[in-house]
Amino acid sequence: MSKSKQTKPPARPDKPEPQKVLDELTEGNHRFTHDQRHHPRSDLLRRKEAHLGNQADHAMATVLACSDSRVPVEMIFDVGIMDLFVVRTAGHSMDSATLASVEYGMLHVHTPLLVVLGHTGCGAVTAALDMVQNDAVPAQASLRGLLSGITPAVHQAMADLPEAGAEELLDRAIEENVKQTMQALFRQSKAIREGVASGAFAAVGAIYDLAHGRVRWLEPQQTAGAPDPQNQAAAESRNEIGG
Ligand SMILES: [Zn+2]
C-alpha cells in the first residue's frame, strides 16, 4: 500500500453526524417493528422537492442490501424519498458496478453513513452454502459467479462452527457475508477507507431479522474487518472531529 495522501474527503457540514443517522434509522426501525410507521417525507411536497432539488442535499445513508423482496429498505427504516441511496444485489454481492454505486453514494450524494444490510434466511447465502456443501452448482454462469463471491463467507462460517447445525451455520454465514462485503469495500475503495478513517463518514453492518422486522447493528469490529494500521492511526488522530 502506498502512503495515503492527506486528501480531505468531501465534507458536508450541513449533513447530520453518522451517529445521528444511525439513531434515526434505529428509531424508524423501531416504529416499523411496532407497526407504527410515520411515513415521513413521502408526500406530494417531498416528491416535488425531489423533482426540483438535489438528492445530495438530503440523503443520509448509503445502504448496500440484498435484492430480496422481503427486505424493503425504506420501509424497514420508516424513511422517505431522498433519505437513502440504496444499492441492491442478490446477497449484496460485490462487483465493479456495486462498488462504483456505493462510492457514488458516499462521495457524490455525500451520505454520512454506509450500511451493509444482510438478512436472515438469505436465499443467496443459502444457495452458496448448498453449492459448497452439496455441490449444487447452478446452471447459469452468471449466478455461479455471484455465488462464488459469497462462498468465502460460507467457508469461514464452516471453519468457525464445525459442529453447527444447518440453521446456526446459515446465520453465521449471513453475518460473515456482511463482514466480508464490508472488508471488500474497504479493500477495494481507497475513497471509502479514507473517508471512514477521517471521520467524514462511518460504515456499519447490520442484519435484518425477517421474523421480527428488527435490524440488529453489528459491532464495528465485526464489520469493518481489519483496517490497515495506517487508517486506524488516521482515525485515532482525528478522533476529535468525531463529536
Ligand atoms: Zn438475501
Image (cartoon, rainbow, N blue to C red):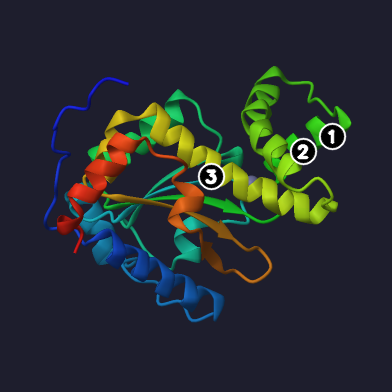
Q: Disc number at residue 179?
A: 3
- Disc 3 to disc 1, C-alpha distance: 21 Å
Q: Earlier in the sequence, mark 3 or mark 1?
A: 1
Task: Look at 51% across and 47% down and name the residue there.
Answer: 65
Image coordinates of residue 111 in percent, x first then y, are 27, 50
Question: Whole-percent x and y of residue 233?
Answer: 26, 42
- Whether tag 2 and tag 1 are in contact, CB under 8 A, the answer is yes
Report helix, strand or loop for mark 2: helix
Residue 160 got which mark? none
Closer to the camera in the image, 177 or 208: 177
Specify few, some or many for label 2: CA neighbours under 10 Å numbering under 14, 14-19, or 20 or more: many
Q: Is residue 39 above or below residue 133?
A: below
| Separation of residues labelled 2 and 1 (CA atoms) | 6 Å
Depth order, front residue of 55/239: 239
Identified at 76% across, 48% down, the residue is: 161
Q: Secondary structure at mark 1?
A: helix
Name of the residue lying farthest toward the right: 134
Dot 2 or dot 3, earlier in sequence: 2
Instruction: Report how many numbered discs are placed on residues in the image.
Output: 3
Quick one: quadrant of the N terminus?
Answer: top left
The residue at the point 64 percent across, 71 percent down is 212
For the residue carrying disc 1, how many other residues have a C-alpha within 10 Å: few (<14), some (14-19), or many (20+)?
few
Residue position for label 2: 129
Label 2 sits on what residue type? Leu
| Residue 51 image position (x, y, % from top left) | 23, 50
The residue that mark 1 highlights is 133
Residue 200 visible within the image: no
Q: Amino acid at mark 1?
A: Gln
Q: CA distance from mark 2 to mark 3?
A: 16 Å
